Image (cartoon, grey):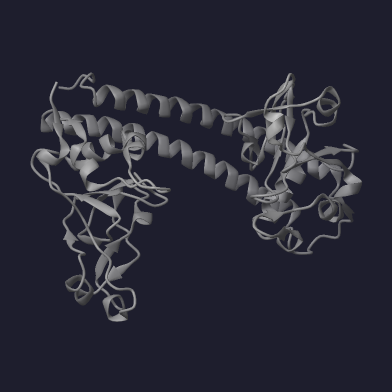
Amino acid sequence: MKFERLGNITAITSGGTPLTSKREYYDNGTIPWVKTGDLKVKDLSEIPDSITELGLENSSAKIFPVNTVLVAMYGATIGACSILKKQAATNQACAAILPNENLTPDYLFFYLSSIKKELIRKGIGGGQPNISGGILKDTKIYLPSLSQQIHIANILTKAETLIQQRKQSIALLDEFLKSTFLEMFGDPLVENKKWEKEPCGNLFDMKLGKMLSAKNYTGTNLKKYLRNVNVKWGDIDLSDVKEMDFSEKEIENYNLLKGDILVCEGGDVGRTAVLKNDLKGYCYQNALHRLRIKNLEIIDANYFSWYMYVGVTKGLIKKETTSVTIQHFTQDKFKKLKIPIPPIELQNQFAHIVAKTETLKQQCQQSLQQLQQLFGSLSQQAFKGELKTP
């Protein structure tokens, strides 16, 4: 098994940024100029920003050739990788690994992507890690023959393509439900229906969760509880759940039942999800509103959840939020928020469509998870020299 230090088999450098005060370095520029925020796709050809020849000459920026592999060394996208598919310059936050005859760019891309977390852990700096050029040069890579590199990259590319297709299918299903909601109920921000409106306080029993407190993180009656981060649009994410001490009375007050609606009071204000199953033994914190429908013959949880999604993403409750450092949607304001009440038969029809679509979405998500696990397994085998190649 042959491992090589990356700095021994390829050249690694970085770019630069012309003075932003000099508009002549940017205006009407013809040289594509990559920033770390552009490293979102494997093959990078769409580059929104550019610099001029004058900007290039008066900075440390340089033009890199096609098939240069770029790595974000710091910032929000640290560790992200892309392969240049057109000649371009970069800023100094992008490491540029130049192509050569020993290493195919696709193989290198997949390898660096597979060790992204490890590279970030090695990052130096204070509050913000920095993957230096030295770290990249000292990184060791399994280096099979070029034909084997191509074979490995082809396998991983096919697996990645299937993953992207599943993600696109899930996004299309969400878009279908959104367009169906708009067709059936109209835009929440436009008064185009004649339905009566009811304040949320009349429709739901509404309760904020338990206040967070450091002293409650230990105790004799620790229970799992949901936070803002657990509530996604239309779904509950239980991958990161904390525990806090709840008394028997508090468990009774802050319990969660199938059909309950959770709405973010702070953070991503208004983000809403319906509990599809009982979460026995779970409670919730005070950054969440729990809504429990008073009369199922008046309003359906699926209708309300999608009303919130379509409305909030268009700015429905923006004027109702308060903010010092973090936005909040207080219970008093929430109770006064008026919701159009379509005929329950129409709401139930929409709920039926949601149920069928969610079944398809769940199948896609299960397939996606399996493909991601397969991709991870293939990557591990490939970069340890354990994947069979011709």
User: Closer to the camera, 161 or 87?
Assistant: 87
State the image coordinates of residue 142 (x, y, percent, origin top left). 18, 28
Q: Position of residue 18 (x, y in %)?
A: 27, 71
Quarter of the image holding residue 246?
Answer: top right
The residue drawn where x is 22% and y is 47% is 133
Residue pictured at 74% horizontal, 29% vertical: 283
Q: Residue at x 33, y 59 (%)?
A: 35
For the N terminus, the quadrant is top left
The quarter of the picture where the C terminus appears is top left
Q: Is residue 291 left or right of residue 92?
A: right
Q: Is residue 160 left or right of residue 220?
A: left
As drawn, is 144 to the left or to the right of 264? left
Q: Measured from the top left, where is residue 68 in percent x and y?
A: 19, 50
Please name whichever residue, 146 or 181, is drawn nearer the observer in this view of the structure: 146
Question: In this rendering, does residue 316 appear at all?
Answer: no
The structure residue drawn at horizontal position 77% and vertical position 38%, both measured from the top left corner, is 209
The quarter of the picture where residue 281 lies is top right
Q: Nearer the viewer, residue 72 or 124?
A: 124
305 is higher (above) or lower (below) than 44: above
Q: In this view of the protein, can residue 130 be seen by the observer?
A: yes
Front residue (pair 242, 307): 242
| Relative horizontal placement of residue 367, taking residue 53 as reference (left or right) | right
Q: Is residue 75 above or below residue 344?
A: below
Q: Position of residue 74 (x, y in %)?
A: 35, 50
